[in-house]
Amino acid sequence: MARTPKAVLPKAGENPGKIIDIDVSQEMSESFLEYAYSVIYSRALPDARDGLKPVQRRILHQMFEMGLRPEKGHVKCARVVGEVMGKLHPHGDGAIYDAAVRLAQPFTTRLPLIDGHGNFGSLDAGPAAMRYTEARLAPAAMAMVDEADEDTVDFGGNYDGQLLEPLVLPAAFPNLLVNGATGIAVGMATNMPPHNLGEVVAAAKHLIDNPKATLKALMKFVPAPDFPTGGEIIGLEGVADAYASGRGSFKVRATAVIEKVSSRKQGIVITEFPYNIGPEKVVEKIAVLVKGKKILGISDIIDLSDGQQGTKVVIEIKNGYEPEDILEQLYKLTPMEDQFSVNAVALVNGKPLTLGLKELLQVFIDHRIEVVRRRSEFRKAKAEGRLTLVDGLLKAIIDIDKVIKIIRGSEDAQAAKDALIKGFKLSDEQATYILDMPLRRLTKVSKLELETEQKQLSEAIAALKKLLSSEANIKAQVSAELTAVSKSFATPRRSRIGE
């Protein structure tokens, strides 16, 4: 292959007139691979453990760091976007704001992770500018980010190495299944539907208790996806294929009923549309079909949808026409029936894999087992450290006058420490802690309070040791925490399952 010369800026110390020959095909290949790697791992695909793309994870983490908890007030989205962009995500502000908006939209996300205040858009219209909208973490987001400061997950450097960010969130529920994901990478894409939290948690608990559970057994708990916009799911064969192999497709129909809309006319009332389909799009399509005489018998279309009452589109039928026949035509010719193609691609140990339902649940369970283990070890070490100090204080306050006398009679801090260690049989850590305490605190320490704390710490350490003593205990704890999350956030199924 011909080698095309390419002018390259000289490095320090090189001859400024030097031209380096580079193989264009090799340069293109290497550059494209670097770009593809960046898109796949840093932008487009979610991690199978917490179900988040890097931008989503950074938004939630930074909002947690900013103290934007559910009980606190909302702040401008522009401030959140600025913090995320400046500290963690060096990309466009539009991409960050769009990701934050989607986490807040109840018609996009089955369990919203951001509590938005203001105009966050609709299925037919975009949100207001970030300077007008406000946000804070939703209660469910706390279950995603909480405990990250207890050594439950690994942290890595941000884009310039000055700050640390979590490589994954603790994620107390299977977010990837619950909220789904969409993303287009280089050479691959992901499109995963949302599910019902209660159903997914029940399936996860069953898999914890029965590691060899079959897909059929798991589908008794998770029969099909559950879209935030409701609708009717048709084609369970496609759902089963998606759960088995990670690829499959099924149809979602709008929810429509036939009823009298006036004293003399019948009509079709639509209250739910397929996922990501807005009423305006459907109304426009029906109007075009009526104008082109491809659908006969429709006299009027009235869109009564609003943010308060929800979706409601009324289609008036002319006398002499069967509403059932027209409804079938609408399903066939308009987006009132839409196909959802599942492509469950996510990152597992840094590799993009196509995963079925059981694999997705197992990756999450393994992650939670690791989180609970690391959290328990962290808490045990912290409690043991505190217990050591409490034991030292209990020894010292027996003769507080002697402690004060030793400190006053010592030439320097080291001499005082050595005297305390020798006089009260303390460790170096205990003696240092006593010396660092202000005298007013030391004299007011209550022996009864210390003994109570000592007992509580000993009990907590014993419970943590018992938890860490076996894998079965850790799994039981994971299952119990999943039950608690389900009780807090699970809602009834919205999407019906049709024939």
Image (tube, rainbow, N blue to C red):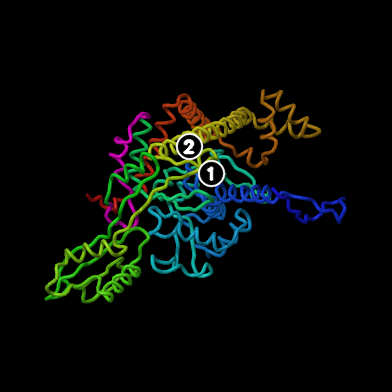
Residue bearing the label numbered 2? 367
Report, in whole angstroms, how far the alpha carbon at label 2 lies from the one at label 1.
10 Å
289 and 239: which is toward the camera: 289
Residue bearing the label numbered 1? 168
Residue at image coords 34%, 56%:
228
Q: Are marks 2 and 1 in contact (CB under 8 Å)?
A: yes
The amino acid marked with disc number 2 is: His
> Residue 119: image x %, image y %?
44, 68
Of the numbered discs 2 and 1, the one sitting upstream in the chain is 1
Q: Secondary structure at mark 2?
A: helix
Q: Secondary structure at mark 1?
A: loop
Instruction: State left or right for residue 60 relative to residue 123.
Output: right
340 and 95: which is toward the camera: 340
418 and 127: which is toward the camera: 127
> Residue 407: image x %, image y %?
74, 33
Specify the quadrant of the image occupied by residue 7: bottom right
For disc 1, the neighbor class at 10 Å (few under 14, some 14 to 19, many from 20) is many
In the rendered image, residue 238 lying in the magenta stretch gets the answer no
